[in-house]
Structure formats: C-alpha cells, structure tokens
Image: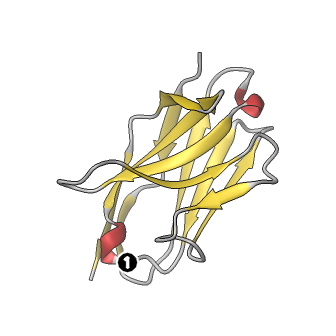
Amino acid sequence: QVQLVESGGGLVQAGDSLRLSCAASGRTFSTYTMGWFRQAPGKEREFVARINWSGIDTYYADSVKGRFTISRDNAKNTVYLQMNSLKPEDTAVYYCAASTFGVYKYWGQGAQVTVSS
C-alpha cells in the first residue's frame, strides 16, 4: 500500500516556473515507476511524465517535453515535477501515481496548477 500526497501547486503567470512534489508513504517507494498526470476542466486525464524506479529512465508527453522535468529522491520517498515556461494550457489538476507491473495503482489527491496569461 502506498499513499501519495502532492504539494506545490498554485497560481502563476505564463512563463513562470513551479515545482510539484509528491511524497509517498511506505518502504517500497523505490520499487515503483512514478508518473505525473493532469486533468484540465472538461477534459480527460492525460499523461504528463514518468520515471522508472532508479530515476535513470524518463518519458514525457510531447506537450511538455523540453519544459517539464521529472525526478525522484528515493531516500526521501519523493517524486518531483519541475515545470518551466508554463503556459495557460498547462492549467489543470496534477496527480502523481505509482505504477506496479505497468498499472498505475496508487494515486494522490491532486494539486491545482493555474497559469494566467
């Protein structure tokens, strides 16, 4: 069982940066692939980025590639999403999730990110 808690959301202007954190409970955090997803009002939840257990392999959605960076600190049971050059279309609730055997089984409660133009 893993519990995930996001933090770091807020209201920023276009072009600003923001870093989201996702703190995980449990001793097995380092064994999970971790992902970030987002859901904008009236839209389906979409994949943003993922990172493997060691932090070596990362993958991004085309819409955020080159602007967002996912990282993790297994000693702190935390995964991060550094978001630079934010755009109004990045406005959404951001969720972190833990994947086991290819399935995102555990989800956080979400953090609101609002980017004004």
Residue 49 on image: x %, y %: 57, 55
- Asked where in the image residue 74 lies, by quadrant, the reply is top right
**Residue at x 62% of width, y 50% of height:** 50
What x and y, as percent, mark residue 82?
58, 64
Viewer can see residue 70: no
Quadrant in which the C terminus appears: bottom left
User: Which residue of the protein is positioned furthest toward the top in this rendering?
Assistant: 1
Residue at the image position 59 percent from the left and 22 percent from the top: 2
| Residue at the far left in the pictured view | 42
Percent coordinates x, y for residue 109 in the rendering: 39, 35
Q: Is residue 13 above or below residue 22?
A: below
Q: Residue at x 77, y 54 (%)?
A: 57
| Front residue of 94 and 56 | 56
Pointer 1: what residue? 87
- Depicted 45 relative to depicted 27: above or below: below
> Looking at the image, is 20 positioned above or below residue 83?
above
Residue at the extreme front: 102
Color encoding of the figure: secondary structure
Q: Quadrant of the N terminus?
A: top right
Label total for image: 1
The residue that appears at 82% across and 53% down in the rendered structure is 56
Q: Secondary structure at mark 1?
A: loop
Residue 41 visible? The answer is yes
**Foreground residue, 14 or 35?**
35
For this view, does 42 lie left or right of residue 32?
left
**Residue 19 image point, x, y percent:** 54, 61
Question: Could you tell whether 83 is left or right of 75 in the image?
Answer: left
Q: Amino acid at mark 1?
A: Lys
Q: Residues within 10 Å of mark 1 (few under 14, many from 20)?
A: some
